[in-house]
Amino acid sequence: MSEPAHAPRRAAFTGPLPLILLDRASTNPARTYLEDVSGRQVSYAEFLALVGKYMTHLWRLGVGPGDRVAVLMPQGIDAHAVWLAIVWLGGWEVPVNIEFHGDMLAYLMADAKARIAVVAPDLAGALARIANRLEHLQSILVTDPSFGGHSYDFGRASVSCFDAGVDAHADVRLAPSIGDGDVATVIYTSGTTGPSKGVLVPWGEFYTALDIYGCRKDGSDVLYTPFPINHLSGKVPIYDMAALGGKAVLRRRFSVGEFWSDVRSHGCTATILLGGTAAFLANQPAAPTDRDHGMRNVVMVPVMDDYQAFAERFSLSIMTIYGMSECGWPFMSPPTGLANARSCGRLRDGWHVRIVDAAGIDVPVGDAGELLVRCDQPHALMRGYLDRPEATQNALRDGWFHTGDAFRADVDGNYYFVDRLKDAIRRRGENISSFEVETLALKYPQLGECAAVAVPAETGEDEIKLVCTGRDGQAVDLEGLARFCAEQMPGFMVPRYFEQLPALPYTPTNKVQKTALRATGIGNAWDRLLHRATVPQDKNASTNRR
């Protein structure tokens, strides 16, 4: 394997975010720290005062060490002030996806055993509808002082409203007794393979993200942050910009139509593009203003096939990373650039990984196996799963974090994501990556999105079903798609079943919920083997009918 991509830059400050903020508010109080796209700005001193005001409210509600406080707020300045106020008082913030409602919201709130909730007024209705199901919930703080709430029934929970005129809690001027290993936040997993679990993220894990945006050490960068607070992509920029002395620009949610106008208006220099957001931008009509911006670096996860054309069109540098809430970011593209569109980067300094088979034996270079991770830096990995000692022990065993992701490496030290282990497909003796099936299928021009899942086969192994949506809502020619797959893929990889849906089911962290797709089985899917005359078949294809 080659040497690590590079050693991490030494930031101006490291440590828990409250300690960094105290220093910044003392040494450079007037410097702008956070700005939302509406134009509202707060300096370090103003933000610290806002944290203190929320501390006063939460202290009155009894928040103390170890209390779990659910936060139902969109990305924004106040959401981060609430986060830090909870931390300052010794509590554990549990940020909730603002799209949650009904059973999903009730599950997370009950699982977290949240005694107190802080909620934006437009999200209060969702909480009210499930409040009577929450035995732990005692108090609710609504962030708008004008909130009436008369039409809502919050059950046993008392309701109070934020008052901007309240005095800041005196302790906001004192360094809280927290260290690198203390809980910074509780981030719930996607729940793609089972019930979501709360990840206890320590402050030490945030330090591992100081390099991932390619930001300069002089504090001149502006990170664009349009992702939610319940995801580390919506929290890490807040930490990084405080540590480096830069500014974060916040938007409630990602918008294709507003992306470049936000970047230009607010002088943004770096961001991350997750999932299909890069493709959404690339699909917009070319314009004379495509290069009229100050954006320098884009972290693209995953990297789109034609990333070089994207970089050229928008005059950007493209980076990539691999990480999880549980283990930080062990892989990153080197300063020399991306090796190719499939690589997740190279091993970072201080990180160690293994790729092992089911018996825990290291596989040869080039073979796929489960990725195991550890780090030299203390507290770079999660503290565990909230109230799940067995799941914690299973994930953190033998001195390694077991990611559940299948990876492979090449001889040059590049690492490649293959699939989630539970999403991998076994067909006719071949191990098939659903990710690779999807990547090839998405080249079919009619497709909007797709997901490949295993369904039962007569042989006792798996058949592949490709579930898709049409681009711009159009109907997909499934027979044409099957022919395309047969032309593009090796025979053993070509899906047998094809089905179009109006939309794919997603988890709250915007990952396709393949458990739901697998649960439907074959259903009414179009069967390639029933159309042998029009669709090429691989020579080993089963001739059985369902």
Image (cartoon, rainbow, N blue to C red):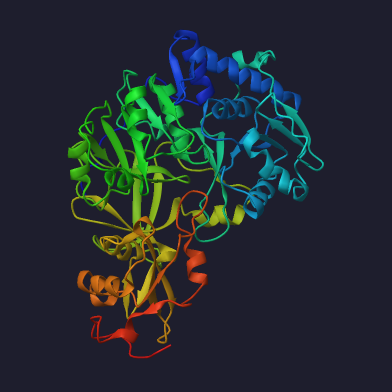
Residue 332 position, x and y percent, is: 30, 42
Q: Image quarter for residue 360? A: bottom left
Q: Residue at x 52, y 12 (%)?
A: 45
The spot of residue 223 in percent (x, y) is: 37, 28
Give percent across and percent down for residue 160: 75, 28
Residue 122, horizontal then vertical, whole percent: 63, 36
**Residue positioned most to the bottom:** 544
Q: How many marks?
A: 0
The reply, left or right, for residue 418 in relation to residue 326 is left
Is residue 309 positioned above or below 448 on the image?
Answer: above
* 517, 378: nearer the viewer: 517
- Position of residue 263 relative to residue 382, above or below, is above
For the question of whether residue 67 can be seen, the reply is no
Extreme residue toward the front, this view: 474
Q: Is residue 264 left or right of residue 92?
A: left
- Does any portion of residue 325 appear in the rendered image? yes
Residue 415 or residue 117, whichever sits in front: 117
Residue extending furthest toward the right: 156
Depth order, front residue of 425/163: 163
Q: Residue drawn at (78%, 35%), measured in percent from left and top? A: 150
Screen quadrant of the C terminus:
bottom left
Residue in view at x 35 percent, y 41 percent: 273
Q: Residue at x 36, y 34 (%)?
A: 259
Q: Is residue 278 above or below residue 171?
A: below
